[in-house]
Image (tube, rainbow, N blue to C red):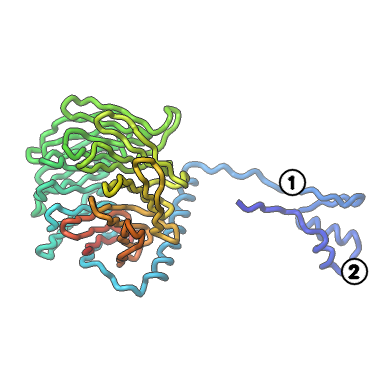
């Protein structure tokens, strides 16, 4: 922070005065600047009589201040994007418009459908095969979307405390009610079981075909993120207090892990697992990543960041000539870790303007990494040469969310510019 020093450089002040000025006039001039001068020895002291204690802001005023800062940051970001990329070719194959930011997207396994949800309370599904889309609006923000493994159903989670199961024609099969806002939704990797986590700490499981409730898994702590393990046997959920629970839906019991002390609270922001390993990775708001063993139910390593003041927004893993982990953070940097020794082996600069990395996606078994950011750019990296081998754009504001279908070579993005985009790799 700058030091706002009210003291005046007396030598400079005297130089600027006319020689004819009297000492009384000099003192009057200086007093007007908030300084009291002792006529006997010339010592200065700040006049604190006029100072006021800083006003303590209430919650509403703090919220208004935060909103103002966000608007200023958004304005700066958009100006930078337009200046740097405004004349570039829009590389989106498809653009779907919304009335507010698109905060969640999904792409079907067969590569035939993409879907996006927005803060304007709507979601849209686009058929790539038929070049057609439909949109539906609900009563609150659409927070999360997921296609079933066979690409026949779509689950739409909302802050109106409902999850809707929709078929590929757009018909609502079931409206599944919870008690509070839903933060995330997933399908079981081998069936039509819908799994959704809410801010009241409950994880709900329904049969997506019949709409019947299977069970609820309760922790009492708001859940922020959730993943079904690749074998479908467990649910790994992250929570606002820095805890992670590995749930068994059959027994309704969980193994609890934590990345912080009981007196602390560090939000879990991201979780990823890969089919070839029982080791998963967790990203957190403290800037670090954590490796956990699903079978043992414990944290087995901490991957320390060199900047713990910036939250991790996305994580990933890849088995190559060694086991590597990746984190994308608010500072615009992707950190590549050697999982065997926990050390950072390389840092990829996604955004030189330090705009946040919002999503990373490694191509499993290949030396390719895709990154997305609030600078509106998509970048593909060669993990051997550490060079950016491809860059794409088209959005007029930051990319909030993205999903990659590597098999079909397709990317879907959601942006702060109120659009969903489809890109080809």
- Measure how far apart labels 2 and 1 are at the Cα level: 30 Å
Q: Is residue 230 left or right of residue 102?
A: left
Total residue callouts: 2
Report x, y in % for residue 201.
Answer: 29, 33
Where's residue 326, x and y in %?
A: 34, 48
Left or right of residue 47, residue 83 in this image: left
Q: Determine crowd level at label 2: few under 14, some 14-19, many 20+ residues with C-alpha closer than 10 A.
A: few
**Mark 2, residue position:** 19
Of the residues under marks 2 and 1, which one precedes in the sequence?
Answer: 2
Outermost bottom residue:
87
Q: Of helix, strand and loop, which one carries label 1?
A: helix
**Of 152 and 161, the residue lying toward us:** 152
Q: Which mark is residue 48?
A: 1
Where's the C terminus, which quadrant?
A: bottom left
Q: Is label 2 in a helix, a strand or a loop?
A: loop
Residue shown at the point (28%, 49%) measured from the top left: 321
Note whether residue 119 is visible: no
Please tell me how crowded label 1 is: few (under 14), some (14-19), or many (20+) other residues with Cα within 10 Å.
few
Q: Is residue 397 above or below residue 39?
A: below
Query: On screen, 122 above or below 82?
Result: above
What mark, if any, has residue 189 been given in the picture?
none
- The residue sitting at the front extreme is 321
Q: Is residue 19 visible?
A: yes
Q: Position of residue 363 (x, y in %)?
A: 24, 53
């Amino acid at each position: 922070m700058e030091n706002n020093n009210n003291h005046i450089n007396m030598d400079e002040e005297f130089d600027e005065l006319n020689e004819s000025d009297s000492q009384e006039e000099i003192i009057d001039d200086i007093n007007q600047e908030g300084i009291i001068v002792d006529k006997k020895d010339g010592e200065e002291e700040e006049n604190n009589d006029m100072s006021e204690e800083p006003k303590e802001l209430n919650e509403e005023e703090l919220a208004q201040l935060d909103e103002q800062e966000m608007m200023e940051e958004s304005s700066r970001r958009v100006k930078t994007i337009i200046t740097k990329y405004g004349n570039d070719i829009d590389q989106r194959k498809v653009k779907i418009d919304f009335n507010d930011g698109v905060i969640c997207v999904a792409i079907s396994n067969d590569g035939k459908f993409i879907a996006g949800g927005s803060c304007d309370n709507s979601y849209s599904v686009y058929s790539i095969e038929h070049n057609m889309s439909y949109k539906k609006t609900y009563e609150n923000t659409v927070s999360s979307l997921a296609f079933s493994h066979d690409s026949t159903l779509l689950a739409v989670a909302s802050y109106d405390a409902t999850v809707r199961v929709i078929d590929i024609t757009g018909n609502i099969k079931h409206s599944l009610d919870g008690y509070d806002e839903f933060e995330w939704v997933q399908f079981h990797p081998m069936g039509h079981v819908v799994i959704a986590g809410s801010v009241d700490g409950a994880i709900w499981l329904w049969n997506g075909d019949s709409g019947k409730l299977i069970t609820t898994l309760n922790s009492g702590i708001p859940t922020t993120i959730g993943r079904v393990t690749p074998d479908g046997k467990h649910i790994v959920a992250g929570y606002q207090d820095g805890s992670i629970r590995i749930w068994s839906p059959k027994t309704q019991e969980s193994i609890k892990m934590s990345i912080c002390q009981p007196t602390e609270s560090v939000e879990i922001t991201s979780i990823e697992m890969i089919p070839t390993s029982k080791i998963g990775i967790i990203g957190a708001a403290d800037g670090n990543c954590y490796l956990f063993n699903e079978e043992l139910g414990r944290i087995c390593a901490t991957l320390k960041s060199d900047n713990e003041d910036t939250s991790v927004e996305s994580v990933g893993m890849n088995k190559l000539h060694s086991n590597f982990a990746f984190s994308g953070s608010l500072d615009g940097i992707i950190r590549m870790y050697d999982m065997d020794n926990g050390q950072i082996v390389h840092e990829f600069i996604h955004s030189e303007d330090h705009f946040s990395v919002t999503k990373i996606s490694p191509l499993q078994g290949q030396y390719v990494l895709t990154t997305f950011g609030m600078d509106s750019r998509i970048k593909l990296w060669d993990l051997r040469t550490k060079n950016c081998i491809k860059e794409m754009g088209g959005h007029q504001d930051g990319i909030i969310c993205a999903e990659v279908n590597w098999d079909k070579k397709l990317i879907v993005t959601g942006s702060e510019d109120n659009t969903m985009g489809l890109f080809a790799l």
